[in-house]
Amino acid sequence: MLPNFVSCLRLASLTGAALLAAGIASAQDFAPSAPIDRHALVRRHNPTITIVDPWAPLSVGNGQFAFTADVTGLQTFYEYYQKNGIPLETLARWSWHSNPNPNGYTLSDANQPFTAYGVTMGYPTNERSPAGMWLRENPHDMPLPQIALWRTHGPQILPGDVRDVAQSLDLWTGLLTSAFSIDGVPVRVTVASHPLRDMLAVRIESALLERGGLGVRIALPRGHDIRTKNNPVLDFTQPGSHMTQVVHQTDHAILFEHTRDDSRYFAAISAAAALQIDVLGPHEFSLRPGAGDLLDFTVEFAPDRPRAAPGAEQVRAESRAHWEKFWSTGGAIDFSGSRDPRASELERRVVLSQYLTAIQFAGGFPPQESGLTNSTWYGKHNTEMVW
């Protein structure tokens, strides 16, 4: 949470003049410093993960869309992370759903009277009334598909099956690279987010792909279980209550349309090489390369049918260009010359806060308290979250 803003203002008013005076005096004692090496500043704080840690997922995104991954670079261990740490979700600020409102509830139906200065007015604060409960829960954020590694034969991958973990998020390029082994066979996954479109580029390299034993599972939930206000699980129950249909398919691409009540979104998958796509269920599909040990594809989510997509390598190139510009032109502060033992940790928090703000809070609509990592408060923002 951010510090109390009023307290910050009071502190600034008390100390600002003293700090300014000290700064002016100290500036006379130092020669102008060299420009900050921004590349070094940012990259020395690249997050690295070497174990399966449910409290340490990593995210890529563009401010209105984010994808949060476990150590496999995808959302392979959703249940484990959801139960023991931070959930793994794919969220966009345009993706909403409302349950039917047969009673036609409006805000005034949840009013309670309040009197001040001799005037009584109604405010919609009766959250325990039927109207209040419906209005509090609706609309709610609609999660986008889950993307996970998938064993095409035998038991599914468990956290204990993954060894030799070496995962790193390159903040300068926006590329999330995950290296590990399954059954003693190396796997390498690279994920990047497009800076302007709600699109991922996913590259998987492993001999397991060529052997036909490894693929990707795409699962489209009906939503969140809104019986839970904070950190609700993805709801894969009631498959008949929503619809996933294939709109278009070729050897290299497939377009899904997902609908539930009045809500709709599209998911478009495409690759330069041939894809093998199998149906696992009414809302589940598997994805494998047609041949070879490389699966390199893009997946885009949109409220309307998306236009032609750039290739996976172009998405990665645009990610690199976007993040280099972001770090090169914004504000920066370098504590490497400080002798204070807290300096490195403070610098790390500044850099990571800049990254998280850019991928979670830069859209046109304020996010919830948990940003675009996972659902809280039915996806609704609190006023203090507006930057």
Image (spheres, rainbow, N blue to C red):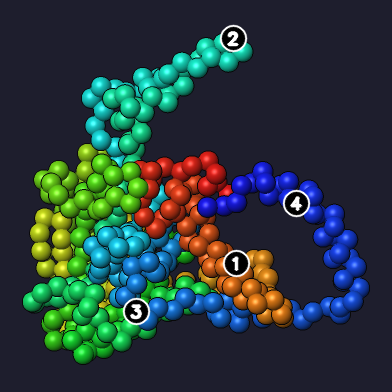
* Tag 3: amino acid: Ile
Q: Position of residue 112 (x, y in %)?
A: 43, 18
Q: Residues within 10 Å of mark 2 (few under 14, many from 20)?
A: few
Proximity of marks 1 and 4: CB atoms separated by less than 8 Å: no
Q: Is residue 367 left or right of residue 38?
A: left
* Tag 4: amino acid: Ala
Please say whether residue 69 is visible from this viewpoint: no
Name the residue tied to disc 3.
51
Name the residue tied to disc 2.
118
Estimate the spatial distance between the alpha carbons at disc 2 and disc 4, rounded to whole Å. 38 Å
Estimate the spatial distance between the alpha carbons at disc 1 and disc 4, rounded to whole Å. 19 Å
Residue 12 - label: 4
* Tag 1: amino acid: Val
User: In the image, what residue occupies the spot 53% across and 71% down?
Assistant: 323
Q: Position of residue 70 (x, y in %)?
A: 32, 70
Label 2 or label 1, whichever comes before in sequence order: 2
Q: Which structural element holds mark 4?
A: helix
Q: Which residue appears farthest toward the front when viewing the image? A: 341
Q: Nearer the viewer, residue 184 or 275?
A: 184
* Tag 2: amino acid: Gly
Q: Position of residue 264 (x, y in %)?
A: 27, 46
Residue 234 - label: none
Q: Which structural element holds mark 1?
A: helix
Label 2 or label 4, whichever comes before in sequence order: 4
